[in-house]
Amino acid sequence: MKSKNPTVRLAMTGLMAALVFVATQFFKVEIPVAGDRTMIGFANVFCILSGLLLGPLYGGLAAGVGSGLFDLVGGWASSAPVTLVTKFAMAWICGLIAWGGHEKSQKLSRVITAAVAGSLSYCVLYLSYSALKGIMLGSAAQSVQMIMLTKLGATLTNAVAADIIAVPLFFAVKKALERSLPAVGRRG
């Protein structure tokens, strides 16, 4: 969705941020882990979809703001700044790869590569943050290992689900947007 209309870009960014927030709020299973917690859910689907639809900057903003707002109101406020940055990075990397060529080059292979790269980058950032947090808090090595194994399982599950769902959803939504956005552009 490469609309030049700033109103359309802002509206789509806000819509995707709201979808990220709602998906995080209502479609999750929290997993307690030795004084910490993680979750399996569908928020990453919409973070990846944001990068694919809106590109690196606007997609990153939608993913970061939507996830950061959830953290602020959902009982995870201490991690909100890190979430904002890591989710922004996930969608930014995804959007950078997906939008790196011409719009017609958004073929299945490029979109899959973008989604997987975005998801894996988030996995690395999230797990690195979690490990550093455990070490900085002085947790025992065995405790950090247990936390990391549980978070690794949840994070990889989220990554695979996000890529499997977001890629076909992107192509479906993209077709609908292409049909409707030219009309919006002409009216504005």
Image: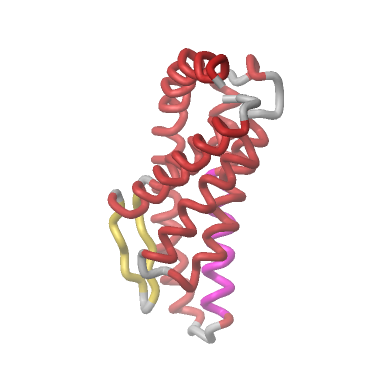
Prevalent SS, magenta region: helix
Q: Quadrant of the N terminus?
A: top right
- Magenta segment, which residues? 119-135
**Residue 145 in the image, given as x and y percentages of width and height:** 47, 72
Residue 99 vs residue 186: left or right? right
Residue 27 x, y percent position in the rendering: 29, 49
124 magenta-colored:
yes
Q: Is residue 75 magenta?
A: no
| The image quarter in which residue 104 lies | top right
Determine the residue located farthest toward the right in the rendered image: 101
- Nearer to the camera, 173 or 177: 177
Q: Could you say where residue 25 lies in the image, as x and y percent from the top left?
A: 32, 54
Residue 63 against residue 113 in the figure, above or below: below
Quadrant location of the C terminus?
Answer: top right
x then y, percent, for residue 8: 55, 30
Left or right: residue 46 compared with residue 9: left
User: On screen, 97 above or below 42?
Assistant: above
**Looking at this rendering, what residue extends furthest in the front direction?**
188
Q: Residue at x 57, y 33 (%)?
A: 7
Q: Nearer the viewer, residue 136 or 48?
A: 48
Mark count? 0
Which of the colour schemes (rainbow, by chain, secondary structure, one colour) is used? secondary structure
Of 21 and 31, which appears nearest the observer?
21
Q: Is residue 52 above or below residue 124?
A: above
Which residue is rendered at x = 58% and y = 50% of the image? 88
